[in-house]
Image (cartoon, helix red, strand yellow):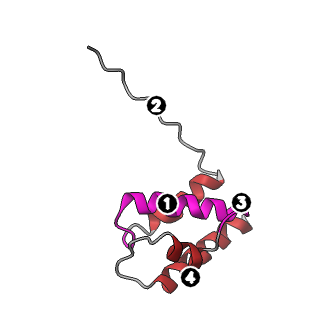
Amino acid sequence: MTTLSPPGTKEFPETSLEKQVYNIVEALADYIPLTNDKNRLGFGLYKFMKGEGDPPKVLLRSTKIKITGITVDELAARIDVELKKISTT
């Protein structure tokens, strides 16, 4: 019996919206300890930037992400600041 190697992962370009949003979430990794929570938040923020999702404050509460060392309101404010940098560039 043989096992096939896993499929390769295609990285997004640094200038893509997906990469920029996920980089914001990675920068806040100290406050979001779980990898799945970071992925869930990144996807939700990507949908928000595309005009399909909730703003960060609502998203942080509705997805029930585990947050440590900061309040939900403070984290939402930091995310808002970073998202505005993306939309202005």
CA gap between label 3 and label 2 equals 26 Å
- Image vertical order of residue 85 relative to residue 2, above or below: below
| Sooner in the amino-acid sequence: mark 1 or mark 2 | 2
Label of residue 8 in the image: 2
Observer-nearest residue: 69 or 65?
Answer: 65
Q: Is the Cβ of the residue at disc 3 closer than 8 Å to that at disc 2?
A: no
Majority secondary structure in the magenta region: helix
At x 38%, y 58%, the residue is: 35
Q: Disc 3 and disc 4: Cα gap in Å? A: 19 Å
Residue picked out by circle 4: 77
- Binning the other alpha carbons within 10 Å of mark 3 as few (below 14), some (14 to 19) or many (20 upward) gives few
Residue 36: x %, y % from top left: 41, 58
Disc 1 to disc 3, how far (Cα)? 16 Å
Which amino acid lies under the numbered mark 2 shown in the image of this protein? Gly
Count of all numbered marks drawn on residues in the image? 4
* N-term mark: 2 or 4: 2
Which corner quadrant of the image does residue 64 belong to?
bottom left
Q: Which mark is residue 40?
A: 1
Within 10 angstroms of label 2, few (less than 14), some, or many (20 or more) residues? few
**Badge 1: how crowded within 10 Å, few (<14), some, or many (20+)?**
some
Q: Nearer the viewer, mark 1 or mark 2?
A: 1
Image coords of residue 4 (percent x, y): 36, 21
